[in-house]
Amino acid sequence: MANYLLVHGAWGGAWYWRDTLATLIRAGHRAHAVTLTGLGERAHLLNPRIDLETHIADVLGALEAEELSDCILVAHSYAGMLGTAVADRRPGRLRHLVYVDAVLPKPGESWSSAHSEATRAQRLDGAQANAQYAIPAPPADAFGLTGPLADWVNRRQTPHPGHTYTQPLDFDPARVAAVPRTFVSCTAPKLATIDPSRQRIADPQFWGGHWAAGGGARVVEMATGHDPMLTEPQAFHALLLGLGQ
């Protein structure tokens, strides 16, 4: 039996992991999904004070409340910021960190740091226009989703707290790199805002060389869109199950 903690990306919720949770539990593992403050079924808590540290505290709190150790932490998209922070602050609690087509920051960067000026302005303008300073959700087809799956995601997405977008994260790359890591790179179609992460993992000097040092990181390419837990669940779940063996 392995312990899994699943963390959704921007505009999402624990609902994003519905089928993943069922698959992991059916295989005999312990699996939990966090819903970040202000999102999903916790959207009623949305307020302008929510920032990156709020969401880091959500994930750390789940580790503590569920008494998870030797944990496989699975971080999707924006949650790459949170997975990095948790690996820096609680490395001894993690067996493996999975970045799922995720934001991969440098120390001192925010989620927005690697985005284009146009993307940054669009998101910040959207947050400014929202009474709770939250970024409106893009349509699901922006992530390559179509048909009933896109309809399901569009119904459930909620605005994302704006200050999480611009608050920088300080961390020690050597501490994070001490945790075994897998980066799942989704390539069909590629999401442009994740391209900086893909470029970074190909750079042997990323994190001052710590990312690739000692063979602790691997990259798995999947020929699917940004949400493999929805669009390629069999292959994605097989990858997660393999880490729990």
Image (tube, helix red, strand yellow):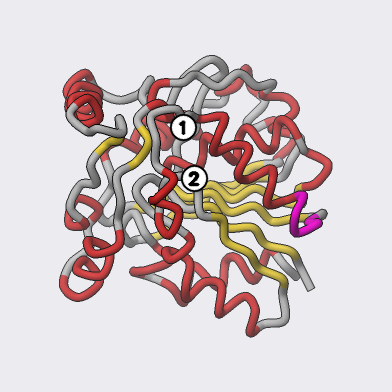
Mark 1 crowdedness (10 Å alpha carbons): few <14, some 14-19, many ≥20: many
* Residue 65 belongs to magenta span: yes
Q: Which mark is residue 40?
A: none
Q: In which quarter of the image is residue 15?
A: bottom left
Residue 4 is situated, as x and y percent measured from the top left of the image, at 67, 62
Q: Is 75 left, or right, of 69 in this rendering?
A: left
The N terminus lies in quadrant: bottom right
Q: Quadrant of residue 131?
A: top left
Q: Is residue 128 above or below residue 136?
A: above
Boundaries of the magenta span = 64-68
Q: Distance between the residues labelled 2 and 1?
A: 8 Å
Q: Mark 2 points at which residue?
A: 37
The residue nearer to you, when weighing 53 against 149, is: 53
Mark 2 crowdedness (10 Å alpha carbons): few <14, some 14-19, many ≥20: many
Q: Is 190 left, or right, of 43 in this rendering?
A: left
Q: Is mark 1 on a helix, strand or loop?
A: loop
Q: Residue 50 carries which label?
A: 1
The residue shown at (71%, 30%) is: 88
* Mark with earlier residue (2, 1): 2
Residue 35 is situated, as x and y percent measured from the top left of the image, at 51, 54
Could one spot residue 101 in this view of the protein?
no
* Residue 87 belongs to magenta span: no
Q: Is 34 left, or right, of 67 in this rendering?
A: left
Amino acid type assigned to the residue bearing label 2 in the image: Thr
Q: Is mark 2 on a helix, strand or loop?
A: loop
The residue nearer to you, when weighing 161 against 109, is: 161
Are the residues at dot 2 and dot 1 in contact (C-beta closer than 8 Å)? yes
The residue shown at (44%, 45%) is: 45
Q: Is residue 125 above or below residue 195?
A: above
Q: In this view, does 54 lie above or below 112?
A: below
The residue nearer to you, when weighing 119 against 136, is: 136
